[in-house]
């Protein structure tokens, strides 16, 4: 705890502590949501399988307007990325060095997860484990990686997106909003492929809002009430009155999905959540000036990515252990026994995740910002191109893994092409960062 206290004590007065709180809350709510709606049962062949409880809980769909909090994370990411990019450039750094540092924070802990999953798959196969079950387990444990892929894409675009923000302001998110609307129109008319661009346009639009927050151009306190009211009105018109599903979390059977890719309804949800955030802005900032709440926020953020990456692995450990012992309950979803089972279920998951975080958080904690200066190696275009190439390879690897069927027979649990692409990209990013750090180091 001493490093956490020291870090908390060194927090500059100018830091927007609310951003740090929201980052932690967003990902912790994702973890809690996944755990709450996870339904582990046996299929007709007696094998473990899983599904989302939301498929049987239509009454909970409006609650997803508050609990689908990934838009909050992307807005907070926009704020943090704008702040760190500006700071890096002020100290003489460039976009390539910034991208290398940002990627390193995300990729190192992710590489540990993928290597552990691959090793587990290679061990399980000679023991006679069904190859389809191995793939299902690895696919389940790697569910968090689809979000990471989306966020890495947004990070890659940040230097360009922030430059456009400074030049054109509100026109940028408005254009992105229009592109998302066109994609939705195509999806409603039976052309889903034309809407796939919203995977980029939608998250970029939400991320772009964080730039305005960083600039101090968003209303706070009571002045944010029209933003909140407008978001709620748009959300009701699009879902209750209009054709969009009520749920902001993907559920099988809906005409289109609001999150995959982001729809206009999800952007309205983001506006509603932003309104809530800004209405409570000053009160939250005052509360976070207290030492104890701020210590908790700092401690949580120091291992936040590890918590997020490993939370579905905890589900596998608990469900697998209970199943092997023959004591895994499978009550009917939304029944009283099912809700009562949520309590010990969450407690066991929390205990297992705490152990996983204790083991693997040192990888996240080991990341330290390298010395920055003006002595970056040249040519800059080559460094930037190689860095973006590494990021693209990492994203491709993550996407191929998530898009490959969970029932496929994969020798490594992860598709080989996905594993090779990811490791190649991660290695290239690490090499570029090492070369940059060496070039910036003082000589003699």
Image (spheres, rainbow, N blue to C red):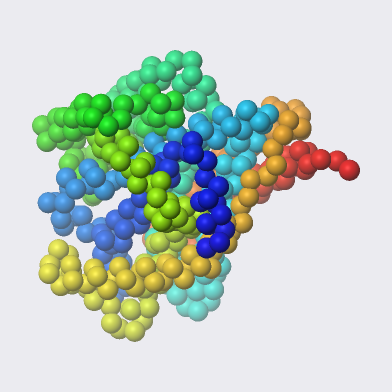
Relative depth, front residue between 369 and 145 = 369
Judged left or right of residue 335, residue 293 is right
Q: Position of residue 159 (x, y in %)?
A: 55, 28
The residue sitting at 37% across, 68% down in the picture is 350
* 424 versus 382 height, above or below: below
Q: Is residue 231 visible?
A: no
Q: Position of residue 6 (x, y in %)?
A: 56, 54
- The total number of labels drawn is 0
The residue sitting at 30% across, 83% down in the picture is 326
The residue sitting at 42% across, 18% down in the picture is 169
Relative depth, front residue between 397 and 79 = 79
Relative depth, front residue between 335 and 402 = 335
Q: Position of residue 330 (x, y in %)?
A: 22, 73
* 100 versus 427 height, above or below: above
Relative depth, front residue between 51 and 65 = 65
Q: Is residue 299 visible?
A: yes
The residue sitting at 48% across, 65% down in the picture is 357
Q: Quadrant of residue 132?
A: bottom left
Judged left or right of residue 344, residue 84 is right
């Amino acid at each position: 705890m001493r490093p956490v206290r020291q870090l908390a004590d060194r927090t500059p007065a100018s830091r927007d502590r609310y951003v740090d709180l929201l980052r932690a809350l967003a990902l912790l709510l994702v973890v809690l949501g996944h755990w709450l709606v996870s339904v582990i049962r046996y299929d007709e062949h007696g094998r473990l399988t899983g599904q989302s409880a939301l498929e049987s809980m239509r009454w909970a769909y409006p609650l997803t307007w508050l609990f689908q909090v990934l838009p909050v994370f992307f807005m907070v990411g926009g704020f943090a990325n704008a702040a760190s990019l500006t700071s890096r450039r002020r100290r003489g750094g460039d976009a390539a060095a910034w991208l290398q540092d940002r990627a390193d924070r995300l990729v190192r802990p992710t590489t540990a997860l993928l290597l552990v999953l691959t090793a587990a798959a290679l061990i399980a196969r000679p023991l006679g484990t069904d190859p389809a079950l191995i793939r299902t387990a690895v696919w389940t444990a790697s569910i968090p990686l689809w979000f990471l892929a989306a966020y890495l894409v947004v990070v890659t675009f940040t230097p360009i997106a922030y430059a456009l923000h400074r030049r054109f302001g509100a026109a940028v998110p408005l254009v992105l909003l229009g592109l998302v609307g066109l994609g939705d129109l195509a999806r409603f008319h039976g052309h889903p492929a034309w809407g796939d661009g919203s995977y980029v346009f939608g998250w970029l639009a939400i991320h772009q809002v964080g730039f305005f927050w960083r600039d101090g151009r968003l209303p706070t306190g009571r002045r944010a009430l029209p933003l909140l009211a407008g978001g709620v009105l748009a959300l009701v018109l699009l879902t209750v009155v209009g054709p969009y599903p009520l749920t902001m979390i993907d559920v099988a059977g809906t005409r289109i999905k609001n999150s995959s890719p982001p729809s206009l309804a999800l952007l309205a949800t983001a506006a509603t959540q932003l309104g809530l955030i800004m209405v409570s802005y000053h009160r939250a900032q005052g509360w976070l000036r207290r030492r104890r709440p701020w210590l908790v926020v700092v401690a949580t953020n120091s291992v936040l990515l590890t918590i997020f990456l490993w939370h579905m692995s905890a589900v596998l450990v608990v469900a697998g252990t209970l199943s092997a012992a023959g004591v895994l309950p499978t009550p009917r979803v939304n029944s009283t026994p099912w809700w009562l089972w949520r309590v010990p279920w969450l407690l066991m998951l929390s205990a297992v995740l705490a152990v996983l975080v204790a083991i693997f958080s040192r990888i996240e904690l080991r990341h330290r910002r390298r010395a920055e200066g003006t002595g970056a190696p040249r040519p800059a275009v080559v460094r930037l191109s190689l860095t973006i190439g590494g990021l693209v390879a990492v994203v491709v690897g993550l996407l191929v893994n998530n898009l490959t069927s969970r029932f496929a027979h994969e020798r490594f649990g992860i598709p080989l092409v996905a594993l090779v692409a990811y490791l190649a990209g991660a290695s290239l990013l690490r090499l570029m960062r090492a070369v940059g750090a060496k070039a910036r180091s003082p000589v003699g």
